[in-house]
Image (cartoon, rainbow, N blue to C red):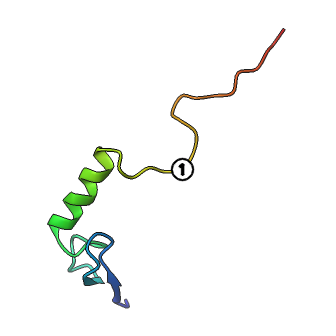
């Protein structure tokens, strides 16, 4: 197994993608929780239509 070096998506600190890093791809639990909080507050979003939104089609 190869261990790759990567940057933490939150703070940019160099970390490693290895089984020993239980917070990967983050460098620490703090960075992991900050990212989770950003998702919970909807600061991050996946592009696409609004949930439940669908085009209205006339059937008549």
- Write the residue at 54% across / 50% down: 47
Q: Residue most toward the top? A: 60
Q: Quadrant of the C terminus?
A: top right
Asked if residue 53 is positioned above or below residue 12 in the image, the reply reads above
Q: Residues within 10 Å of mark 1 (few under 14, many from 20)?
A: few
Q: How many marks?
A: 1
Residue position for label 1: 47
Could you tell me which secondary element the residue under label 1 belongs to? Answer: loop
- Estimate the x, y position of residue 2 in percent, counting from the top left: 37, 91
Asked if residue 58 is positioned above or below residue 27 in the image, the reply reads above
Q: Residue most toward the front? A: 43
Please state which of residues 40 and 4 is positioned toward the viewer in this rendering: 40
- Write the residue at 22% across / 70% down: 23
Please state which of residues 38 and 15 is positioned toward the viewer in this rendering: 38
- Write the residue at 28% across / 73% down: 24
- Estimate the x, y position of residue 20 in percent, counting from the top left: 20, 80
Question: Residue 40 falls in which quadrant of the image?
Answer: top left
Asked if residue 47 is positioned above or below residue 50 in the image, the reply reads below
Q: Quadrant of the N terminus?
A: bottom left
- Estimate the x, y position of residue 37 in percent, counting from the top left: 24, 51
- Write the residue at 35% across / 84% down: 6
């Amino acid at each position: 197994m190869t261990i790759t070096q990567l940057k933490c998506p939150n703070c940019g600190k160099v970390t490693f993608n290895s089984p020993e890093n239980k917070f990967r791809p983050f460098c620490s639990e703090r960075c992991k929780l900050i990212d989770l909080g950003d998702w919970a507050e909807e600061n991050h979003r996946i592009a696409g239509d609004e949930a439940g939104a669908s085009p209205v089609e006339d059937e008549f």
